[in-house]
């Protein structure tokens, strides 16, 4: 294909520099963006026989590239996947009060390691320790940067050079290909597997305990389920085993439920931190940014002597959290003190509990406002949403979605346009259509969602001008 029609760099720089946002940008930045867009355009013409773009369409592409380059590196997106605790999208969104608390301390100073009563240096976890102990019934608590760090610290501090017993059915792989045996090994502990994938009995643990055993580790396999012919040993029974043989019992419950999830209309099989503490676990580990609905954090609750030992370990400094995390976590825990308040103000719970009839009404209003948009067919369909983040992988939540069919564009191209737009939207493709699940779209984002869809549809028109 001939490339003679392509405008010069100078012509496009002159064009794009007349637009208000770009007019204030340094000329070298504008020139670099123009050259990058033109290089990409030339390659597409040569390799793909792509459509010819007008000078106006190229100018718009350059403007969009500059806008993206100068935007904050991490921008908000609209989560239309139907996965509430979406690991790829930052897991749990925070309550407004938690966001306000983060902002308040981020802009100034806060007594992160200063005891305001005595004026002496204190420990970071003191900010949230009382709240964690009150909510879980534990003697003490501490906080690190995520739950994998909590497990690594426990292994390093309490089991290094000794054996840790784990059921084969609980040797999970976490997201990003991080495997439980690797974390245990990184902590210097020695893994002792017992039982089989689907059945592990108390006798299996009993036979494995010897003088080299430091701990029994029970791990909630939060991202999968084994159904049918299966057996596991309850945490209370393991606590009795640990007491008889003088070995620690550690329960990694993963998702961090502080209470039953029955108020969400879900028959929950998720372990609850306070139940594990009451059952006799020496330590309970869980995440802060899943069912807790707070910021990313790894929380360790349990016996005071063990918590003190962990906090005094040199590795603790490498895994500590900052003031904004402590501020958000503290407010989130305060909300959990009152179940109705938590259900109303924590987005994870509010989204999960949103009535299906209300979602359908929102969907109908959105579809009506998109009616008549050329090249777009929109319907409202029932769908299934999930809590996500490894929580309740087999228990779906009834939901509804905007289902968009764009024959002239195709679902993959439409998803790409939505994802790259000014108000990025992440959805999913199924059955030749784009599905935008409304359970994970905040009502306040409806206008942005509509704008994103219209912008994606207008893109093809612009490119052919």
Image (cartoon, helix red, strand yellow):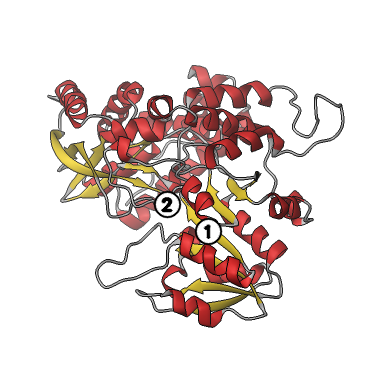
Instruction: Say whether disc 1 or disc 2 marks the residue closer to the N-terminus.
Output: 1
Residue closer to the observer: 416 or 280: 280
Q: Which mark is residue 465?
A: none
Q: Position of residue 66 (x, y in %)?
A: 52, 32
Name which residue lies at 27% across and 25% down. Answer: 450
The answer to whether residue 231 is above or below residue 292 is below
Q: Which mark is residue 251?
A: 1
* Disc 1 from disc 2: Cα separation: 10 Å
Q: Position of residue 146 (x, y in %)?
A: 58, 49
Q: Position of residue 238 (x, y in %)?
A: 50, 66
Q: Are marks 1 and 2 in contact (CB under 8 Å)?
A: yes
Disc 2 residue crowd, few under 14, some 14–19, many 20+, Cα 10 Å: many
Horizontal arrangement in the rendering, residue 53 relative to residue 433 (left or right): right
Q: Position of residue 350 (x, y in %)?
A: 35, 30
Residue closer to the observer: 347 or 313: 313
Residue closer to the observer: 143 or 278: 278
Looking at this view, name the residue that lies furthest to the front.
244
The answer to whether residue 304 is above or below residue 214 is above
Q: Secondary structure at mark 2?
A: loop
Residue 320 visible in rendering: yes
Residue 71 visible in rendering: no
Disc 1 residue crowd, few under 14, some 14–19, many 20+, Cα 10 Å: many
User: Quadrant of residue 155 in the image?
Assistant: bottom right
Q: Secondary structure at mark 1?
A: strand
Name which residue lies at 54% across and 27% down. Answer: 98
Q: Which residue is mark 2?
A: 271
């Amino acid at each position: 294909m001939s490339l003679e029609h392509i405008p010069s760099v100078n012509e496009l720089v002159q064009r794009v520099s007349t637009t208000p946002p770009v007019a204030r940008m340094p000329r070298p930045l504008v020139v670099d963006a123009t050259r990058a867009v033109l290089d990409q355009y030339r390659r597409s013409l040569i390799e793909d026989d792509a459509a010819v773009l007008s000078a106006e369409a190229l100018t718009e592409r350059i403007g969009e590239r500059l806008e993206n380059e100068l935007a904050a590196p991490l921008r908000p997106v609209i989560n239309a996947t139907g996965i509430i605790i979406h690991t790829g999208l930052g897991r749990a969104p925070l309550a407004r009060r938690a966001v306000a608390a983060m902002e308040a301390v981020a802009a100034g100073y806060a007594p992160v390691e200063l005891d305001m009563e005595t004026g002496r240096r204190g420990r970071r976890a003191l900010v949230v320790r009382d709240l964690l102990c009150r909510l879980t019934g534990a003697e003490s608590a501490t906080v690190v940067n995520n739950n994998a760090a909590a497990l690594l610290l426990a292994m390093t501090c309490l089991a290094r050079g000794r054996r840790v017993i784990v059921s084969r059915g609980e040797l999970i792989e976490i997201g990003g290909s991080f495997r439980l045996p690797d974390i245990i090994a990184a902590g210097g502990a020695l893994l002792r597997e017992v039982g089989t994938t689907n059945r592990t009995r108390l006798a299996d643990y009993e036979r494995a305990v010897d003088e080299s055993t430091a701990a029994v580790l029970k791990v909630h396999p939060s991202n999968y389920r084994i159904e049918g012919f299966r057996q596991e040993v309850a945490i209370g029974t393991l606590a009795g085993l640990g007491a008889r043989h003088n070995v620690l019992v550690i329960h990694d419950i993963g998702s961090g439920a502080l209470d039953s999830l029955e108020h969400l209309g879900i028959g929950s099989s998720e372990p609850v931190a306070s139940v594990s503490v009451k059952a006799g676990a020496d330590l309970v580990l869980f995440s802060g940014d899943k069912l807790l609905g707070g910021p990313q954090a790894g929380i360790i609750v349990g016996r005071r002597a063990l918590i003190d030992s962990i906090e005094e370990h040199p590795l603790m400094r490498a895994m500590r959290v900052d003031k904004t995390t402590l501020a958000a976590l503290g407010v989130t825990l305060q909300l959990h003190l009152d179940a109705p308040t938590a259900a109303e103000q924590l987005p994870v719970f509010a989204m999960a509990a949103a009535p299906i009839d209300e979602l359908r009404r929102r969907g109908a209003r959105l579809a009506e406002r998109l009616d008549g948009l050329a090249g777009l067919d929109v319907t409202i369909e029932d769908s299934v949403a999930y809590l996500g983040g490894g929580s309740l992988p087999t228990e779906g939540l009834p939901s509804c979605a905007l289902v968009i069919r764009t024959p002239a564009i195709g679902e993959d191209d439409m998803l790409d346009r939505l994802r790259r737009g000014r108000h990025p939207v992440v959805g999913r493709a199924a059955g030749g259509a784009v599905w935008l699940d409304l359970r994970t779209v905040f009502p306040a984002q409806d206008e942005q969602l509509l704008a994103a869809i219209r912008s994606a549809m207008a893109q093809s028109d612009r490119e052919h001008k």
